[in-house]
Image (cartoon, rainbow, N blue to C red):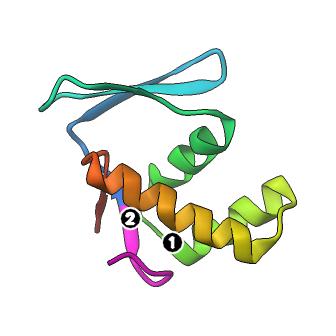
Amino acid sequence: MLDFTSNVMLNDKVVSTMVDGEIVMMDADSGSYYALNSVGTFIWELVKERRKVGDIAIEVARAFDVVKEKSDQELVQFLEKLMSENLVIMA
């Protein structure tokens, strides 16, 4: 279970590139392709370096001027989705 003290990082088996300001990626193991919107891309860029979920939450709230409680909830859901697809791993 992911919480704000968890460290997350990109799975090194995922290949990603920036296309028109958004991340497009492929999981080398499954061959699946993914694309992220601007918020997802922002988070992906933060996760390139091992980070605590709580630190990512602060950066997202600051960058997008959102209600932190709602943003925190959505961030955890998003990261858990990336983890379920094996794109992000707990460090």
Precedes in sequence: disc 2 or disc 1: 2
Splitting the image into 4 quarters, where does residue 41 fall? Answer: top right
Specify start and end residues of the magenta stretch as a single range.
Answer: 1-8
Q: Nearer the viewer, residue 67 or 16?
A: 67
Residue 75 location in percent, x, y?
57, 62
Magenta stretch containing residue 7, yes or no?
A: yes
**Predominant SS of the magenta segment:** loop
Q: Pointer 1: what residue?
A: 53
Residue 59 location in percent, x, y?
70, 63
Residue 62 location in percent, x, y?
81, 63
Residue 61 is marked as: none
Q: Pointer 2: what residue?
A: 8
Disc 2, SS: strand
Vertical position of residue 73 compared to residue 88: above or below: below
Residue 49 location in percent, x, y?
44, 56
Asked if marks 2 and 1 touch (Cβ < 8 Å), the reply is yes
Q: Nearer the viewer, residue 69 or 57?
A: 69
The residues tagged by marks 2 and 1 sit, at their Cα atoms, a distance apart of 7 Å
